[in-house]
Amino acid sequence: MLNIDEYVDFNVLRDISYLIGITHDLGKSTSYFQDYLQEQDEIKKLELKNRPEMHHGFISALFTYYITKQYLTEKSLVNEKYYQYLPIISFLVVKKHHGNLTNILDEVIDFDRNNEEIFSRQIKAINFKEINHIYQNLFSKINFKYDCSLFRKNILEPRAVYIYNKLDRYEKKYVRDLSYQEKKLIIDLDEEDTLFYYFITLLLYSLLLDADKIDAADLKEVGRIDIDKDAVDKYIELKFKKIKKEEHKINSIRNAIYQEVTTTLDDLDLDKDRLFSLNVPTGTGKTLTSLSFALKLRKKIESEKGYKPRIIYSLPYLSIIDQNFAVFEDVFKSSLNGKHPSSNLLLKHHHLSDVTYTTTDFGREDFENISPKDISKDIFL
């Protein structure tokens, strides 16, 4: 099990994700993009949209790259193992946030003269005095300072390149940084025996996409619901009260398994114990036992680590998904005094699921056509 804390400081990673979020659309601040947004004539708007200066992904990614690099430099981490890859990972995440992640090596070797001219025009079309004013306020939230006009220099000003102490050519700093320095780092990844870079890229990419889509759709944040960690205990007590009195042997077995699993939580070390396995015969109560363990583990994590994790129940076959969902729904319905759990508490998703999301507000249920992949929930099947 990959533990991020063993590789990078969580607070640093949190700041990096924040910087990615606030810098990923710098390219939209050009006069080209602003003219497009304000144009009322649809024909002219379409003409503006097709201009190459409208493509804001690369210029925004470069901005994010230099911002994250400066942040890590101030922390004296930019050359440290694991941290040194965060700027180029941030670059990739922003550059591809409107598409799909690709081979990162391909993203640092494709520069031509036409692109340089486009980037120069884009940079000249940004009011850096205003941008600096905006970003100083945003940067201050994490005690970080950066003069955004330095980014302008990295794009516009060529640097002399010497080979064997002789001037060979002039080259833009960003071209040299990406095509040489970062390219070498990426090639060296082949010697790394870890999945950290893979998962950290997916994490930062997912965080950006989730935040960007929610903001673009102007969705309100879905509130988290406090779930009773003993919900399954109470459900079993109520549901099987009569059966218990009849002393069925199978129920004695189920209860023994249930008690053994749920009582082990007190002895768990959350820093060491990360994978758990429950191997018992069919019909001995795995569904309820697993749910109860997950709810109690969730509460333990919240108490000891200070955050409230979501529960993702991943399983095969539509019939089993439907069957387990019905059991979970019944448990929470019992916990909610007969009310059906809303989608921000329990959500079922597979390729035949209805693209519907329900929220409960003052006893009413509102339906919104939102993809289940882009919303919050506490338990996800």
Image (cartoon, rainbow, N blue to C red):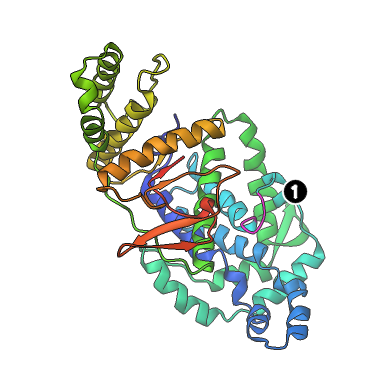
Residue placed at 64% from the left, 41% from the top? 186
User: What range is drawn magenta here?
Assistant: 96-100
Q: From the viewer's perspective, is residue 85 above or below residue 290?
A: below
Closest to the observer: 320 or 218? 320
Residue at image position (50%, 35%) is 321
* Image location (x, y in percent) of residue 214: 49, 62
Whether residue 99 is in magenta: the answer is yes
The residue beneath circle 1 is 164
Residue 273 placement (x, y as % from top left): 33, 25
Whether residue 266 is visible = no
Q: Is residue 300 above or below residue 51?
A: above
Front-lying residue, 278 or 304: 278
- Disc count in the image? 1
Position of the N terminus by quadrant: top left
Residue positioned 40% across, 20% down in the render: 277
Most foreground residue, 350 or 158? 350
Coordinates of residue 298 in the picture (x, y in percent): 30, 38
Position of 241 relative to 122 (above/below): above
Q: Which amino acid type is marked by label 1?
A: Tyr
Residue 299 placement: quadrant:
top left
Residue 292, quarter of picture: top left
**Numbered disc 1: secondary structure:** loop
Q: Is residue 91 left or right of residue 118?
A: left
**Residue, far left:** 245
Query: Residue 114 location in percent, x, y?
Result: 81, 67
Q: Furthest-top residue in view?
A: 249
Mark 1 surroundings within 10 Å by alpha-carbon count, few (fewer than 14), some (14 through 19), many (20 or more):
few
The reply to whether the magenta stretch includes residue 199 is no
Up the image or down, 325 lies above or below 142; here it is above
From the image, give the main secondary structure of the stretch colored magenta.
loop
